Amino acid sequence: MRREVTKRRGNRTHRINSSKISGSPLSIQGVGALAAGGRRWDVLVIGAGVIGLSTAYHIKENNPQLSVLVIDRSAASGQGDTAKSMAAVRDTFTSDVNRLLARSTIDFYKHVQSKLGFNLNLNLVGYLWLLSKNQFEAYENITNQMRKQGIRIKVVDRDELAILIPDLVLDPDTEQSKMIGLESVHKALHGLDCGTVAPELIVKFYENEFKKLGGEFEFGTEAKSLHLGAKTPLGLPGEPFVWQDKVFKEVETNRGTISANTIVIAAGIRTPMLLDPLGIDCLVKPKKTQIFQVRGDSVGRLLRTKGFNEQNTTPFTILPKGEVYFRPVPSERSFWVASAAGIGEPFKFEEEPTADENNYKYNIYPILSEYFPCFANLRPINSWAGFYDVNSLDSTPILAKISNCVIVTGMSGSGIMKADAVGRMAAAISEGKEEATLFGDQRISTLQLGLTNRAVPREEFVI
């Protein structure tokens, strides 16, 4: 019996088909009954977003004999922050670690789409950074370093920009542009192996493959707390004591307790909510993201820009001011528009985040309409909001193992573009390996992204 789950992003609806769990006679309700009744799993993964799904799939692929359960508070996979992102991918990072994670993941997505024949709507339309003179000079050395690492990035001069994007105002000079301090566009950087993807299709791919291997799900199940116990219990009241080695015994959920030999926490911004009560600092804070969908006849030509890519559309574009950026969505004849939540935007969690149109009206629109007057007088037709699980230390994923618990968090807005590599690393960590093999047979230490003795530089190319 097929079960159809509807996932809604604002007024936009995607449909995900959840078939009966492959290799098991249990329904979703049946899995929950066993879990609540005390069945012990080899591996429990908390979170069915793209990171949790990738991790669960690679654990099960590496060890088919293990019983692996994924739980999520939503009604289906990928309905949290995975569904609420801009769903873009890029390999242009200042950190060699982030470059490796992103490049490996993008290459895997290419493989899935072109070799395995599973459409992910991966479109390498590129990333385009429009830069002032000062910004370009600051990034020039970084750009050269990226090229040495094999990243394909091109410098686009002003004259070429004027031809390629006639809707772009290179030298905004209105009173409003002067008031908000807009600078001239000096040059642009065009990341060639960057683009956009459909998150619901990535989710479907990992979900299907995980089920084929016998992996199981329990939806509508929210992890409330983690229970610690003594590794070698003495039967004394009050255990575990500070002098005892500890293990994660079970997870308390809204549907009872679930026990597992290994617990993987891939719950996005909810990860610190589970770890803080245990005194474990995972370095993560919530940052709200708000995305607005804009449509109108005046932006039609911008959607059909030629010269950047095979799709003949404008790349994913970042403006010089306010970290305002937009993504073309030709299939919807619209753009998704947002701005990076920088200084002034609080680290604050909301249970059900919503987008505030005033953010578009007063923060995004004044900048967007000055550089691109074709957006003038256009208002959002749709909006949605989610969270980044921001690693405030270095903006690089955190993968750590504490006792029998694997922590996978701190994606800082780049979860989709690093998901496959992160999942492979998390799987290796769960097995106690000190090295993980990424797609393309590239190897990476599993120790350098931990909570202690981190060996990564701070990422400077953050959106």
Image (spheres, rainbow, N blue to C red):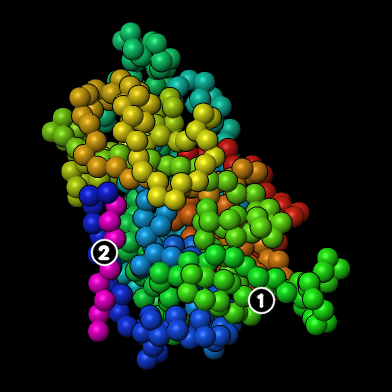
Which one is earlier in the sequence, the residue at label 2 or at label 1?
A: 2
Q: Residue furthest front?
A: 237
Residue located 46% across and 46% down the image: 350
Q: Image height check: is 452 above or below 368?
A: below
Residue located 27% across and 49% down the image: 10
Q: Residue 354: within the magenta?
A: no
Report the amino acid beneath label 2.
Thr
Q: Position of residue 327 (x, y in %)?
A: 32, 41
Report the amino acid beneath label 1.
Lys
CA–CA distance between discs 2 and 1? 34 Å
Residue located 62% across and 75% down the image: 250
Find residue 437 and report its image quarter: bottom right
Q: Residue furthest top?
A: 175
Residue located 60% across and 79% down the image: 260
* 158 relative position to 264: left or right: left
Reading the image, the residue beneath label 1 is: 249
- Front one among 77 and 301: 77
Please state, as top left, top right, bottom left or bottom right, where the N terminus lies in the image: bottom left
* 294 relative position to 176: left or right: left
Find residue 200 and report its image quarter: bottom left
Q: Which mark is residue 6?
A: 2
Magenta span: 1-9
Q: Residue 2: within the magenta?
A: yes
